[in-house]
Image: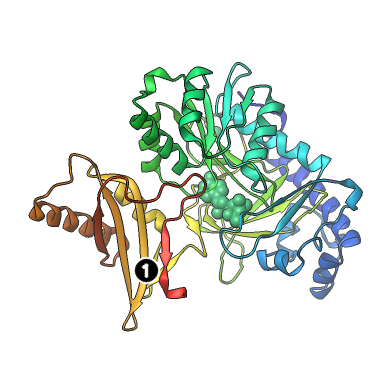
Amino acid sequence: MIWNINKETMDREQMRVLQGKRLQKLVTYVYHNLPFYRNKMQEIGITPADIHGIDDIINLPFTTKQDLRDNYPYGLVSAPHSQIVRIHASSGTTGNPTICAYTRHDLTVWQESVSRCLGAFGLTREDTMSVAYGYGLFTGGLGLHYGVENYGATVVPASTGNTEKHIRLIRDLGITAIACTPSYALYLSETMRKMGITRSELKLHIAALGAEPWTENMRQEIQEQLGVKAYNIYGLSEICGPGVSYECECQNGSHIVEDHFYPEIINPITCEPMGYGEKGELVFTTLTKDGMPLLRYRTKDLTSLINEPCPCGRTSVRMTPIMGRSDDMLIIRGINVFPSQVESVILSMKEFEPYYMITVDRVNNLDTIEVQVEVRDGYYSDDINEMICLKKKLQNHLKSVLSIKAEIKLVEPNSIERAQGKAKHVNDKRKL
Ligand code: ADP
Ligand code: ZN
């Protein structure tokens, strides 16, 4: 279902006009209400009068996570405190937390965005969605929660933890949809197996997965294990939280809520704008926020934009799956390696469970990389030769994708720690 026909299928030219108008209003607002932006704009000699349309956005200054940290806690909040109704803090996957402040209007926009996602995932008001993102400072739980209520479906605020109880609820309440991280979806299916509950006992058929990068192979695995259609939902606290973009039934790139969040792709080194189809760093401008609006916020997420019509009828620009953050990228002996590349190899091989840990170290000034992975029941053997063969097979496969040789450590099923929220896949000992 298309939740907001008017905005989601808007003519491209009309959308750009709308974005331009919103940008002009936003720039005028921050210029007069936030010394931080006024100073930045004065430094480069630009005033609100220089913004005539959305194309002029490339002349505006960027905002970085460091700016948020430097102005912690309230330096980038533009609305008076009496209008702020909620505060979240980013989970701080990388570095110190930063806060995000929302006015009532901002929360309305967020709910609207999540409702568009739910429509695209095929929910109806008859559906019951269990929200298994963490509730709290992290935007995942409350973000989805209020989106589902706004949509008019039923929400079960399961949060994370208590997985067995949660599975019984999914079965007993006939829960049809779940929102969680892809890692948690896998963990659920694994716990179900241990409890002896099969997917045919559940009514679950939709999964809204996000908050961390995941691969196409991971999608296949989850769809198969849980008997669901798994959709991507993307977002970040600084922009609002989950709901910035979402997949439709075509599962072919995530539609961006671009009447509220204007996307750009830049070269992460030179900051030059890049074209459609080119891979670079994703940048967002919050066109309509008034609690803590951001101009050209650098997400560090690496992706590319698709500006072609989608068979679903939505006209919005789509983004390809995030391959990682620029600061997730490991440089090993000068070669760029993303954890998502390792994941796609492991999940393409039937011998392994979808759990892995990458350890990077430096021995005698030389970088080393070790991939620890669980061998599936039935493939684990006491025969050393068989295990050596399996190791070699994975090593060769990885080498063809990464161009470097990784040490492989095969471990038994259940040896690697399971994630309830965002999974941790890398232990880089070089930084210690
Ligand atoms: P933190 O930056 O502390 O992790 P957030 O909770 O705001 O805080 O996380 C937002 C980040 O999570 C995004 O910038 C992105 O890197 C990642 N993320 C969120 N959703 C997805 C998704 N669907 N696919 C890949 N990465 C995602
Ligand atoms: Zn579509």
Q: How many marks?
A: 1
- Three-letter residue code for mark 1: Val
In the rendering, at what x and y percent does residue 56 appear?
A: 75, 59
Tag 1, which secondary structure? strand
* In the image, residue 371 above or below residue 245: below
Q: Residue furthest bottom?
A: 364
Q: Nearer the viewer, residue 388 or 220?
A: 388
Residue 255 sits in quarter: top right
Quarter of the N terminus within the rendering: top right
* In the image, residue 50 above or below residue 417: below
In the rendering, at what x and y percent does residue 389 appear?
A: 12, 55
Q: Quadrant of ligand 2?
A: top right
Rendered residue at 36%/61% (across/down): 358
Can I make out residue 18 in this image?
yes
In the rendering, at what x and y percent does residue 262 appear?
A: 69, 49
Can I make out residue 348 in this image?
no
Q: Residue furthest top?
A: 126
Rendered residue at 68%/59% (across/down): 297
Left or right placement of residue 44 versus residue 177 in this view: right
* In the image, residue 186 above or below residue 266: above
